[in-house]
Image (tube, rainbow, N blue to C red):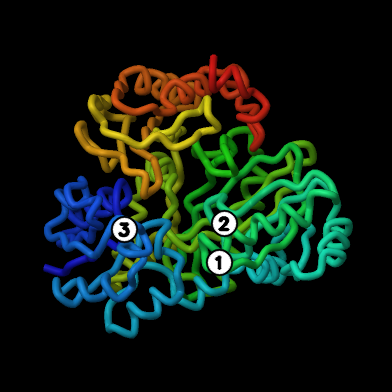
Amino acid sequence: MQKVLIANRGEIACRIIRSCRRLGYASVAVFSEADASAQHVLLADEAYGIGPAPVRESYLRIEAILDVAGRSGARFIHPGYGLLSENTSFAEAVEVAGLVWVGPTPASITAMADKGRARDLAVAASVPVLSGSPRLDLENDAAVVAAGDQVGFPLLVKASGGGGGIGMKLAEKAGDVVKTARTVSALAERTFGDGGVFFERYVVRARHIEVQIFGLGDGRVFHLFDRECSIQRRFQKVIEEAPAPRLSAGTRAEMTEAACRLAADQNYAGAGTIEFILDDETGDFYFLEMNTRIQVEHPVTEMITGQDIVGLQLSLAAGETLDALAHRPPEYSGHSIECRLYAENPAKKFFPSPGVLEWFQLPKVAPGLRIDTGFVEGDTVTPYYDPMIAKIITSGADRPAAIVAMAEALAQIEVAGITTNLEFLKRVVAHPEFMAARTDTRFIERHGTALTEG
């Protein structure tokens, strides 16, 4: 039996294990000392320790992961999302070791890893981009201010090698821009090992919409429609849905075509996501970035299309032909919503709240309800990793039905021992503006206290 080593942890590792089982692959887990009894370790066919709790001493140790691959006889390496999933050096090391990387080529990862370069590639593919600056020289304050003036205020300071909303801050005026740029650069250096930053025009009424694409590596690319990801805190997503509501058929066609065109230009192979900013006032959309991996929110796309995206990744990596999907891409049906349940305190700026899940009851999975989690009652949410506990995904014949199903699912969740964002999620889903699909990236900021302390 072929083996897949999952170079990740938690919820996404558990989710990949499910696809491995369905396709007949054995799964190999890796774990830090803090995760020795984690669910992904218990669910996998084999599991190997790779170091202490801090990620740099365990999950980011390329040599340790490759050593496990050798000892276990794993042929495939699936990186999941986050951690090493968009690390070119890791992808190259996997291939040099004679193993199969379940993802795009290292060249594709490199092309999209630097946001400035990705913007240039988007322009070359005739995909619209927001005005912005080149990579900044932070030793020259005057040049930084001049670059900000040219882009215009307010603007976003963004990490060149960032992702997932990390390394992004708003600068309201010229007096803030140098300090903000240096703050973002320091964070980016610590998080990504790359302190490069640049400026990008800030859209006040912005919607965050992304397109799920899948490439066959030969210039053929198909899409699995779009997702709305505008409900965010600290530029990081909390609630997603598919397809994006209030999106005209014309805009959807233009956006999906642009996404496929950009990926096709790179001969992209595997699952990827093209993220866009949609100006809610003008209807114009702009390229934001490309994520060369599976997304946290991929389940909503799977719910409306019936596709197993992780399964598609594994099939392509194994050399299977996906010609049928390229010739006739899937259609979608209905609507799906995902809520991320976090161990965090919304009333305290969403600060993480690690601890023991003394009581943890989730609704039973049923048609139209999916739960993706890496925790069970009695587990500990540690301070070392992302505090997401579970993803609650519902679907219905239309958006109102999906919202009703989500409200019912959230009402059945019980958590004790730690603080979570459960009540916050309930308030968002019940909010009149959300129900009317009048959302943008400042939704949480705008409704503030009503959502976090209501």
Number of dots carrying numbers? 3
Determine contact: label 2, label 1, CB under 8 Å: yes
Label 1 Cα crowd, 10 Å radius (few <14 / some 14-19 / many 20+):
many
User: The residue tagged with tag 2: helix, strand or loop?
Assistant: strand
Q: Is residue 217 in view? A: yes
The mark nearer the N terminus, 1 or 3, is: 3
Q: Nearer the viewer, mark 1 or mark 3?
A: 3
Category of crowding for the residue at label 2, using alpha-carbon neighbours closer than 10 angstroms: few (below 14), some (14–19), many (at least 20): many
**Image point (40%, 31%), residue name:** 395
Indicate the quadrant containing the C terminus: top left, top right, bottom left or bottom right: top right
Q: Secondary structure at mark 3?
A: loop
Which is more foreground, mark 2 or mark 1? 2
* Label 3 sits on residue: 8
On the image, the x and y values in percent for residue 411 come to 36, 17
Front in this rendered view, residue 250 or 318: 318
Q: Which residue is mark 1?
A: 263
Residue 296 % position (x, y): 42, 48
Q: Quadrant of the N terminus?
A: bottom left
Image check: 315 left or right of 105? left
Left or right position of 402 against 451: left
Q: Nearer the viewer, mark 3 or mark 2?
A: 3
Label 3 Cα neighbours within 10 Å, binned few <14 / some 14-19 / many ≥20: many
**Residue on which disc 2 sits:** 274
- In this picture, is 39 found above or below 188? above
